[in-house]
Image (cartoon, rainbow, N blue to C red):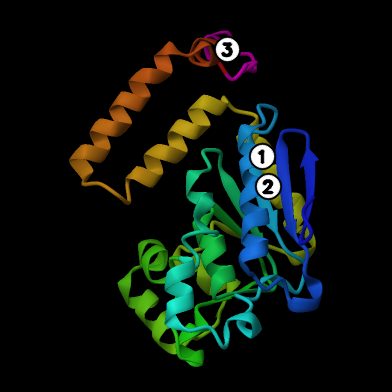
Amino acid sequence: MAEHLLIETHERVGLVRINRPQRMNALNNDVAREINDAFAQFDRNPDVGCIVITGNEKAFAAGADIGAMAEWDYAKVYGDDYITADWEGIRAIRKPIVAAVAGYALGGGCELAMACDIIVAADTARFGQPEITIGTMPGFGGTQRLPRAVGKAKAMEWCLTGRMVNADEAERAGLVARVVPAADLERETLALAAKIASFSLPVVMKIKESINRAYEMPLTEGLAFERREFHSTFALADQKEGMRAFVEKRKPAFTNR
């Protein structure tokens, strides 16, 4: 049973809520392992088509647990393979993950949100990579995912100054998919996730994989990958159902096959 999470299922949507309010949802290895375990369980569950992760109204996750890290040395973090060993399970999740962010998403919290597939931000959200202000640097993708999302210039400024960015600026920069009123964040995000989960799960996973490949291979190879995945959808019962439903002017009944 997860100690630091609240886990729920809303029809075909799995919801993971980080629950360390006394520490502003600060992340550590235990929390990371619990998140990865929860994601993996939803990923294996055929009745779940999309996953949502959120925090509370004050913080999605206000960063890593600095108090626990302050006296670590190089030998420890290198020997423990810190972050790599416990935090990167999210990369193996095949179903879409939506981050619903209110309040602070700083340092590791911002990096966790960026590791998800879509970020929906409350108008109260604040993003940033403030590691430089405490004598270190991002280590969970902040210098890698951020420039892919917002470009080199903004990533350089945000990481080299530690400046916090509000939800509107994050949306303009391309980090955030949409901004909603804080009171509507969970409802809007669950509705978005439910819509994704209503489609053919094999196709949803193919689209996620294809878009992620766009960041990891040249355009020519990416187009070839996309083309083969597109071709492969014609082996699915859901492709037949979807196209027949369109022709017959009715709603498709996907069976995830």
- Majority secondary structure of magenta residues: loop
Residue 30 drawn at (x, y percent) = 67, 63
Q: Is residue 146 above or below residue 226?
A: below
Can you see residue 12? yes
Q: Secondary structure at mark 2?
A: helix
Sequence-wise first label, 3 or 2:
2
Q: CA distance from mark 1 to mark 2?
A: 5 Å
The magenta stretch is 244-256
Nearest the eye: 31 or 7: 31
Residue 177 drawn at (x, y percent) = 54, 56
Q: Read off the residue under disc 3.
A: 245
Q: Is residue 45 above or below residue 87?
A: above
The residue mark sitting in front, 3 or 2, is 2
Residue at image coords 75%, 57%:
17
Nearest the eye: 77 or 208: 77
The residue mark sitting in front, 3 or 1, is 1
Q: Residues within 10 Å of mark 3 (few under 14, many from 20)?
A: some
Q: Is residue 65 above or below residue 95?
A: below
Residue 100 found in image quarter: bottom right
Q: Residues within 10 Å of mark 2 (few under 14, many from 20)?
A: many
Q: CA distance from mark 3 to mark 1?
A: 32 Å
Sequence-wise first label, 3 or 1:
1
Q: Residues within 10 Å of mark 1 (few under 14, many from 20)?
A: some
Q: Is residue 247 magenta?
A: yes
> In screen coordinates, is 84 left or right of 186?
left
Q: CA distance from mark 3 to mark 2?
A: 35 Å
Q: Read off the residue under disc 2.
A: 38
Can you see residue 121? no
Nearest the eye: 95 or 31: 31
Can you tell which mark lies on residue 41?
1
Residue 203 drawn at (x, y percent) = 49, 27
